[in-house]
Image (cartoon, grey):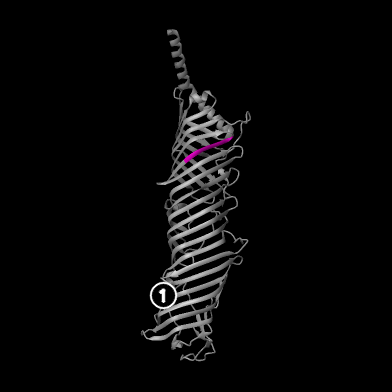
Amino acid sequence: MKKLLFILIGLTALYGVIGFLYLPGVINAQLTEQLQKHSGQNFRSTSTSFNPFTFTLEMDDIRVQDKQSEWFKAQSMSINLNAWRLLSGHYTISDFTLNQPLIQTQWDEQGQLIQPVLQLVQSEATNEPIPLNIEQFQIKDGEWQISQSHHLKPTTLSGITFTSEDFQLNQGTAQGELKVQLGKASQVELSVQFDQAAQAVLLNWSLNHLNLAEWSSYLPASVSKPQGTVNSAGQLLWQLDEQPILSIKNLEVEGFGIEVDGMARISEAFIQAENAAVDFNHQAISVDLLATEHGVFQWHSLTPSTAQQPPTESQAAPMAWHIQLQHLVFYETDVELPDLWRLDPLVIDTLKGTNISLGIGSEQTSPTQASEWQASLRQGASALINIQAQQSHQPLTLIGALKVTDWPLAALNPMLFPDHQWQVKQGLFNSQQSFEWRGDQWHTQGHWQINNFELLDAQGLTTAAWPALVSTGGGINGNHQTIYLGNLDLSQAQGFIQTMSNHINQAEQQPGAPSDWRIQIGPFKNNSQRHEAANPEVPSSID
């Protein structure tokens, strides 16, 4: 009995000596050989230790290099094998932990992965995959540097933490559940499937509480000051020999805000998108629904604050993208117009567009059918503007109908009479117009009516007044910068309207403000009441 005990102790000691002293070198050599054989990568670590009694492998200062350069390193790695499952031919890892890994990847202008250079080779000895299962997989405090050849500065994702349970590799596929912590509060949950035969990765993901302000450095120079919290879910399909296709099932952004090249600022909006797809192979984006609720749209300028500069030799030209929006909707959005217009804010009750096609970085691609637009805007309690239009392309054309209901003309005083030579005391404007906008040419045609109107001069005296003034031949020609007031019915007008003189040209003009506009009045009809038109059948002009 003692002899048997000594034998067992001796074998245990020998097993321990082999496990602690010999096996670390064998394991390190096998990892290096297998990684080089199956992927073309060079593996090394400064120290390797193995506990044969707990089946725990630990490595420090791990580095992986392809044919060009080093692209992966980690402070340490710990692997705990399940010895009992190993006896049955199943490679089961109870716990796999990577501490402070750094991954460096690089893509070219077409979005193809150029670092690391992977050469995935299937084993010649057998086509059967290794039955590998990782019960617990963790990455702590990771960092991922993403470089693109047309960007001088790489994108760095730091503080990444992965947690996966039941990661399996069988029947040529790998699958697992991952969680990624990005930034202070952002979290991504991923369900991963990898098909080794098809060389494809499928990710089902959900994104929670992503703070856009933390990603401002990754936006184009023309876009700044992002705000908002993003929640989203979708899927990513990536054939490794192609670029990925991103599908977004739903996306919500609370408190969204952004500024675009000094032209406009959006703040405190709620954004919702459904069924969007981003195809990086064909630079195409399609969205079934993009909706905006509430928020404030501040329109600062009609032109960008800075001219677009051509790319330098170290910067590639931006890729051309085509965007297709099936439905675009705005609800309850405040619009603050440029200061030079001197107008009170508008409110977009609803604005709906269908089949909208946009081109970025390339010529506009014409859709198969015209876009449809409907809008309802208001100012104050009762003023409404309703618009219906069709939009076609090449050249860009917008044709439709415009209806204005009870618009208070007194609200237009700052724009119409900046020199205070006259002031509208009261008056409600109603109009129905057809309009056409073709590139830089536009005009409207229709009829309008002004009710309960009163105009004051600089001394506060009534210059013109009427219960109702109707024009059945009015319109605006943007190319000639002329407002037409034709077929005027002055039967209920009082005062001396011809005293309205050059109030536009005499006012001090601001850069970008409308200038040199003319108002053409006449011919008149129903002239039984007193007015001072020199010739009622000859149009009069106010320059």
Q: Nearer the viewer, residue 270 or 27?
A: 270
Extreme residue in the left direction: 459
Is 28 covered by the magenta stretch? no
Residue 173 within the segment the image draws in magenta: yes
Magenta stretch secondary structure, dominant? strand
| Quarter of the figure with residue 416 | bottom left
How far across and how far down the image is residue 256, in percent? 43, 56
Q: Is residue 237 left or right of residue 209?
A: right
120 over 371 or under it: above or below: above
Q: Is residue 171 left or right of residue 494?
A: right
Relative horizontal placement of residue 123, taking residue 151 as reference (left or right): right
Identify the residue shown where x is 51% and y is 82%. Answer: 471
Q: Quadrant of residue 284?
A: bottom right
State whether residue 330 is above or below residue 17.
below
Choose between 499 and 215: the one closer to the eye.
499
Any part of residue 385 in sight = yes
In the rendering, at what x and y percent does residue 82 appear? Answer: 48, 27
Using the image, determine if residue 520 lies above or below residue 401: below
Magenta stretch in the rendered image: 172-178
Q: Quadrant of the N terminus?
A: top left
Residue 255 placed where, x, y %? 42, 56
Residue at (50, 76) in percent of width and height: 431
Give percent across and percent down for residue 6: 43, 10
Q: Residue flagged by tag 1: what amino acid is it?
A: Ala
Q: Residue at label 1?
A: 411
Q: Which residue is at the front of the view, 314 or 200?
A: 200
